[in-house]
Structures are given as structure tokens and as C-alpha cells.
Amino acid sequence: MRLSTIVFPTLTALATGLAACPEDKADRPAFVDVSFPESFRFGTAVAQWQVEGDLGDDGRVYDSNWKRWMDMGKSKGAQQNVDGNGFRRQFVDDIARARDLGLDTFRLGLDWSRVEPEPGVFDDAELDHFIVVLDAIRAAGMNPVVTLWHWTVPVWVQQPDPAAEGGAVDRIATTNAAVVDDFERFVRHVVPRIKDRVDTYTVLNEPFSMITLGYIDGRFPPGRTLDVDRATAFGVNLLFMHGAAYAAIKELDDVDADADGAASFVGLTMTANEFTPELVGDPEQERSAASINYAFNDWVMIALTSGDLDVNLDGDITDTDTVPPEGRYLELASTLDFVGIQYYGPGRITDEGLLGQLLADVAPLYGAPLLDVAGYSVGDGALLPSNGMGREISAAGLRDTLDRYAQWGVPMIITENGTTTNGRVPELPEDFEPGDPLPRGDPQEAQAAMYLVEHLWELGRAIADGLDVRAYYHWTLADNYEWVDGRTQRFGAYAVDFDDPTYPRRLTRMGEALRDIVDARAIDQDLWARWTLAAYPTDRRATPRGTTSIDPKNP
């Protein structure tokens, strides 16, 4: 991490310095322009459940693990996700909005729970609707990218409510691999219907997010805590689900829909960020950071490039008493045409405090991951710039992450990156009821625009340095339902008024900045000055500064 080397002159300091020491304009530091190749794609990304909720046509309600989780009151304020942000009713307009930003790619998910509500029973009307959406994307001159597992699955695959009839169900987090065949059946049903419209697939979305939040942290379904055995079984089955889906897509998709010379381009997306110790040099925290980075960033990549499966995440593939036995699996090897990088900020590791001490002896963590600056306890960490979810803002961290993933030798796509336009949301009152107006943090659209420009500038530098990054998809097009946070967190390039039943959209400053960058296919000094501030409004350090790895004016 290079945070200690980031030095940005504030606009005030720069102006003061120039007034005190007049100099020839030619002697001033030149701004480092970045540009994006003509082949580089700009897009947006949405998840079906987040934008459509449980709603189907004619008032139909689709069941899923996430609907049951909401029925259990697991979101903030027990909010319900009835219809997401209204995308199902206004997808044509939303696609046009994406095109108005100059975007050429639209990533979206197809929920398994909608297409196969019962084992072997397919809802082709729902698949027909999805194809209509794909056609609208193509009619707008954009290419669709389809995600086949974005966390929402049928209740016969995962049903988290132990009080429901039949009790809780979790067929992924088991050493029984039958779910791999189930998922392949779903993929084989879908691909022949969409292959003439789609070439790029992200099979899985952020597997490690669901591993940690569903089985270690407990905030996501099925809500288990520190259940390393089930977490590992869940992750292993996901790897084989990916391998089976990759092979099926390669077999079935024989149409080059975007005329680029390849019928399919298949990868998955990773929750990608570096973890660093709070106490650099502390041997226990260094060990924890190395172990968590291995599990979080490397484990999936090793398996899907080399085929080497480390079931117990101990760093080798020599254990034969695991299920399945460790070793090299050809059905996993070379199943990534690209990797999707989903970066929202770096993380830190501690073995201090109650949680840190609790996890200090739990493999493969050996400490507590910190993803909210409010939990940082060393130096001025808690004063770092952050978004409405508490994630540290660091464009330098994006470059660190890209450098880490470049080692695997596969092309990279930024399949998600973005930040909130809201500040921290106050706790919901005890008497809050679903449907009550949600409290909001102060809008921070200027901060969000600066975040976008800094991160895309850092990405432009990485490409100039030779990293193979093919595209950038902004998360997300319009404010949506942010999983257990519901409508309290706003990531949209378009703001949504959820108090109006028509859910009208408004272009944010972040959306305007994205449009400017896409239009210019570059970030020059004028664009930088237009959208960046002297410092982030949330930066409370004694010397606030930007977060890129070098100063654009003093490389």
C-alpha cells in the first residue's frame, strides 16, 4: 500500500504558492493525461434481484433465498424488496439512460430462482422476458453481459428459514456435489436461448462475499457465523459449478453475437481488494493479512487457472482426507477467459479488540478483517475518507489490486466499481416500520464524482503501464435495493426517488462525470479540475489529500 506516499497540493495551497512565487507557466508541473484505447469498453452493471425485487409479470411474486431472508426481517428496518427500483417496468428507459451516458455495455444477472423455481421445472415466460430485455440492450447499440449466479437462488437450493415448512435447506454448503449438476442443468437450459444475443458471461458473482457474509459473518443467508466447514464446502461447490458452467457455455454457445471473432468470453467476478495489517511489521497481523489475502484473492484464481484445489485453504494441495481430496482437477483448470475485478476499497487486518482476539486462532483468518474505517484503530485510519457504508476511499488501492490480479495472466475487466452518493445513514428508529420514509445521510454527490474520476484516472495509468484491462462497468446505473441495507445506500449514476411510486430518476454529478470521461475517452487536466475537490469531504486527517498512487501533477 502506498498511502504514505500520496501527496496532493490542495487548490488553496497551489494558489497560494503561485501567488507567492510567480513562475513561468512552462516550469509548472504538467498534468499527466490518461486515455482509454478505442477497444476499451465502458458499461454499467445491475443485479436482477436488486432492480426487480420479487416482482414478476401480472403481480406474480418470485420466491428465493433472498425473499425468505427479507421475510425473516434480516434487512435494516425489516425492509422488503418488492420491486427493486422499478427496472422491470421501465427497463427500456433505463437502457436508454445508460446509452445517454455513452456506455456500450450493460451487465445484468439472470436469477436462477426465477427460471427454475422447482427442480427441473422451468419458467420459460420469465426467460422470454429476460430475452426481451437483452433485445432492448442490443437495440440501443449496447452489448449485454450476463451473470448466471448473483446470489439469488431457488428455495429448493437454499432456504434459510428454519421455521418454514420442511426447515432450512442449503444444498450448496455440503460435501454432496449434486448441486453442481443442478446448476449445469440451469445453464444448459438458458444458454441455447440467449447465445445469439450474448457472448460475455460472468458465471459467478463474488463467491467469497457470500462465503464470508453467509457463513462467517452471518449477515447474509443462510446466516451462519464462524462456520468454516460449511463455508469451505460452499466455496468448493461454487468452484465446480463454475467449471461445469464454463464447459457448458463453450459447448453450447456457437454464435459470435458481437462479431469480435469469438462466440464466448467466460469469466467470474471477484470481490477484489488488498488487506494490509493495521500494525505493519507485526508478525501476527502480517500472517493474518497474508492468509486472508490468499483466501480472499488467490484461492479461487489458483483453482480456476491451474486446477489446483486447496480444500482446507492451508496453502498446499497435498491433503487426501478432505472432501473432495485435494489435488489438480482438470475440470477447473483454464476455465477463466477473463477475471472480473469488483473493487470498492481496501481492507485492514487486526488481531486486537474482541473480534480480532476471537478470530486470532480461527484458520484461515487468524484475525479480523476490517472494511469500515470506523473500526480502524491505528494512527489516523478512522479519519480516512470513506463512503456511506464506511468503506475507505483509495484509488491507489485499485492499482494495488490490479497489480495483484495481473499475476494470473488473464485479461481483467472492472465489472464493478463505484461509491455512494449518501453519507452514513443514521440508525433506523426503534418504531420504524417497513414503508416508512427512510432516513438519509447528507448527499455527497461531489465526493462520488471525485471518487469516480480518481479511480478511472488510476485505471488509465494501469493500462498505460501495460496491464491488460479491457473494460470498466460502473456500479450502478440507478439507486437500487442494496441487499440487507435495502434502500439506505445509494450507488446510482441516477438517483431514484423511492417516495414517488413511479420511482423517477435524476442524473447525479457522478453520472455527469462518468458521461464526460466516456465522451472524452480520457482524463485531462481540464476534466480533472472540473470534477475533483481539494480533498474528499469525509477526509478528516490533519492534512487531507487525494488517494491516487501518485500526484497527477507531480509524477
Image (tube, helix red, strand yellow):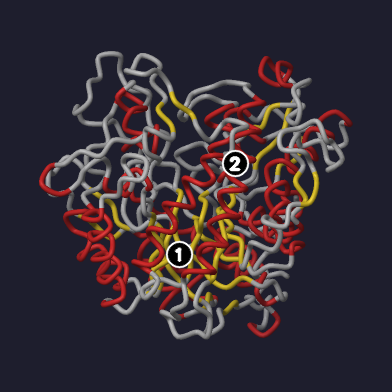
In-front residue for pair 43/353:
43
Q: Is residue 451 visible?
A: no
Q: Quadrant of residue 194?
A: bottom left
Residue under numbered circle 1:
531
Q: What SS does tag 1 mark?
A: helix
Amino acid found under the numbered disc labelled 1: Trp
Residue located 73% across and 28% down the image: 350
Q: Residue 145: image x %, image y %?
A: 43, 65
Q: Nearer the viewer, residue 430 or 316?
A: 316
Which image quarter is the C terminus in? bottom right
Q: Secondary structure at mark 2?
A: helix
Q: Is residue 519 above or below residue 324?
A: below
Q: Residues within 10 Å of mark 2 (few under 14, many from 20)?
A: many
* C-alpha separation, residue under disc 1 versus residue under disc 2: 44 Å
Q: Is residue 415 above or below residue 143?
A: above
| Front position in the image: 519 or 119 | 119
Q: Residue at x 67, y 69 (%)?
A: 462
The disc at residue 237 is: 2
At label 1, counting other C-alpha atoms closer than 10 Å, the crowd grade (few under 14, some 14-19, many 20 or more) is many
On screen, 233 above or below 51?
above
Q: Position of residue 506 (x, y in %)?
A: 24, 57
Pair 1/2: label in front:
2
